[in-house]
Image (cartoon, rainbow, N blue to C red):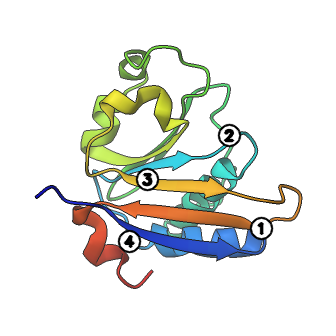
Amino acid sequence: MPFVPQTRIFDVTDLDATAALAVRLAQRLRRGDIIALHGTLGVGKTSFARALIQTLLAEAGIVDEVPSPTFSLVQQYFLRPFTIWHFDFYRIDDPAEAYELGIEEAFAEGVSLIEWPERIAPLLPEACLEIHISTDAPMSGRRRFEFRIPEIWEARLADI
């Protein structure tokens, strides 16, 4: 019987609660992890990714800006024991374009945070953690994070 990913839902009330959820996830990451951030324009994909990245930078003693990769398509943060790759595929038309941005290296050697993952859906492995972000009140800060947890992530996310 095929594995059915577990679903966990987190309702947050503001940007601070979003950041706190990102911090909890950041503490559980390891080389090769792939996180697909789904959601409409402006729902908070970049805010979540930024909080996660800033957590890992701070743990490494680095204070740095975490810009959106909307225009550059990818931002890299070189840390130990892995590099963080933050992709935004909103502007790509063909999944093959992701190869030019280093997706193979990112998947093999780093931690990948992917905004607009549906643009490269054929390239995403089954072990990808999918996070669907939604809101019923965009200006309020209230967000729902639905984690679709593949088997390889279950133990690490059991107490998130």
Q: Would residue 145 appear left or right of 18 to someone viewing this image?
A: left
Q: CA distance from mark 2 to mark 4?
A: 23 Å
Q: CA distance from mark 4 to mark 1?
A: 24 Å
Q: Which mark is residue 28?
A: 4
Please identify the quadrant where the N terminus is shown.
bottom left
Badge 3 marks a residue whose secondary structure is strand
The residue under label 1 is 142
Callouts 2 and 1 close, C-beta under 8 Å: no
Q: Earlier in the sequence, mark 2 or mark 4?
A: 4
Q: CA distance from mark 2 to mark 1?
A: 21 Å
Q: Would residue 60 appear left or right of 102 to someone viewing this image?
A: right
Spot the residue most to the front: 1
Q: Which mark is residue 68?
A: 2
Q: On screen, 59 above or below 112?
A: below
The answer to which of 106 and 81 lies nearer the viewer is: 106
The answer to which of 10 and 66 lies nearer the viewer is: 10
Q: Earlier in the sequence, mark 1 or mark 3?
A: 3
Badge 2 marks a residue whose secondary structure is loop
Taking the spot 29% from the left edge, 60% from the top edge, the residue there is 150
Q: CA distance from mark 1 to mark 3?
A: 19 Å
Instruction: Categorize mark 4 by other alpha carbons within 10 Å: few (<14), some (14-19), many (20+).
Output: few
